[in-house]
Image (cartoon, grey):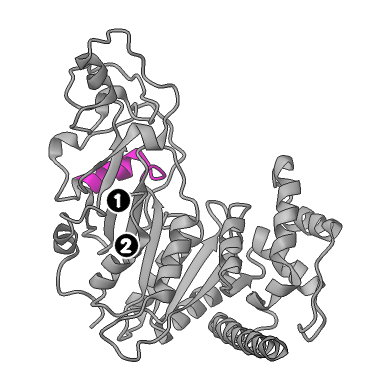
Amino acid sequence: MDESSQSWEDLIMSHMNDTAFQSRTCKIYNNKLSRPAISDKLCPCGRMVRCHSFTDESLESKEAKQGNTKWEPPKVFLNMTHSAKVPINVYGTLQSTGCKFLRTDLRLPIKNLFQLILEDCEKQKPALILSIYGGAKYFTMTERLEKEFIRGVIDAATMANAWILTAGVNNGISKLVGEGISHYRLLREYSIKVKCIGMTMWSTIDDNTRLDLKNASKGHPPPLCKRQIPENTQEDKETIEPNHTHCILFDGGKLNEYLSDTQRHQFVTEACKYKDQDKENDHTCYAVTIIVEGGTGSLEVLENDIEEKRPIVLIQGSGRLADVLALLVEQTSNPDQNQHWIPSKQEIKQALDRFYPNIPDSDVSSTIGRIEKILKEENRYLLHVFSMDRDKNVAETIFEAIFTGIHVKQINFLINKFLSRSYEKEN
C-alpha cells in the first residue's frame, strides 16, 4: 500500500500544534478596522487594503493605538518585517482529481515537508526523485518526442518507485507531465501509483484559483473567502495543474512573487539523505533532473544539481536552453564521449543565437558565464543528452545517468582513499 489510510486533511490537522507548520500573510493591515467597501487602494503586499485576512495586531492598528494619526504605510513590502506567521487554513483535496494541496510558510523547514509527504505515502520512501523542469507557457515539442518523453518518464517512475517534482502550474512542462500521468492512470494499471508533487508560490497562481482553493478548504472561514485584488485587474498568472498528487503552495506574505529553486533543491537533498531508522538496510534514494526546453530561470536548477553532483538529462529537440546545452555538450566532446573541453564564449553565443534568439540582451553575458561553469570538464559526467534519433528511450537514459553518477563517485572515492593513504605513508 503506498497511500496513507489517514486522510490528507486529518494528517494536516495532526500537525497543527507543530510550530514549524504555519502559513504566512501580510501584517501591514488586518481585517478589523472598517474601510470603505468601494476603495480599491492596494497594500504594498499587492492585496487591497480592505481585503486582508490577518486577525492580530497590524502595523496600522499598532500605530493607531499609539496615537499616530499621520502614519503612512511602507512603500515597499519587506518579507521579514511586514509578514507574520498564521495558522495553516488552506489545505484539502480537489474532489475532481484527488490532488492534495497545502498553503504553507515559505520558511517551512523542508525536512518537515518531506516527512509530511512521506507520512502520506505510508512511509514508503522513493528510490528515485525525478525533477522535471524547464519550459513554461509557450514551449512546444513534436508529438513524437512528447509521447516518448512521457512514456519514458512514467516507465522510469513506476520501475523505480519514483516521486516526480515539477513547478506544479497548469502550463508548459508541468501541464504535460500532469496530463501524461492522468492519461497513464486511465490506460494502464500498476501496483505503484506515481507520486507527482508540484511546488509553486501561492502568489504565482491567479486570484480565482486562490479563491477556489480557499472555498475547498475546511480550515478557511467563509467570510475570508473573497477576492483580494480589484475586479478589473488583468492577471497573466497560473492555475495549479490538477493531476498532480500533491501541490505545495509556499507563501511569503506578498502577492506577485515567484519561487526560486531553493525549496526543490532542499527537498531533493533531504530525500536522498533520509534513512529510515526502523529499517536495518534502508535503500538509497537517487535523484535525476530532466530539463525540457527552459529559459534562463532553469540555470539555477542546473547549478544546484551540479553542486550536489546530481545527474541531469537534457531533452534534445525540446527547444531553448535544453537544445543550447545539448548542442554544446556534443560539440565539445569526442565521438566516444570520454573526452571533453569547455566551449568558447563564441560557441556559446552561437548556440544561444540559434536556439534561444529572444534571450534579453541584458542576460546574454551572465548566461554565457553560467553555461561555461556548468560545462566545466569535471561536471560533464553529470550531463546526459537524450536524442530521439540516437537513443532507445528516455527511461534508459535516466538509468544510465544514475549508474554513471554512481560509478564516477565510487572511482573518485577510491582515488581519494588511495591518495589519503599515500600521503599518510609519506608523512
Q: Residue 349 appears at what percent x and percent y?
A: 80, 54
Number of marks drawn = 2
What is the quadrant of residue 310 in the picture? bottom right
Dot 1 or dot 2, earlier in sequence: 1
Q: What stretch is highlighted in magenta?
A: 202-214
Question: Relative to the observer, which residue lies in front, 222 or 341?
Answer: 341
Image location (x, y in percent) of residue 127: 41, 82
Quadrant placement of the N terminus? bottom left
Amino acid type of the residue tagged 2 in the rendering: Leu
Q: Residue at x 24, y 60 (%)?
A: 96
Spatial CA distance of label 1 from label 2 is: 10 Å
Image mark for residue 113: 2
Q: In which quarter of the image is the C terminus?
A: bottom right
**In the rendering, which numbered label is found on residue 137?**
none
- Within the magenta stretch, is there residue 349? no
Report the residue marked by disc 1.
104
User: What amino acid is found at the position of numbered circle 1 in the picture?
Assistant: Thr
Q: Can residue 166 be seen in this view?
A: no
The answer to whether the residues at label 1 and label 2 have Cβ atoms under 8 Å apart is yes
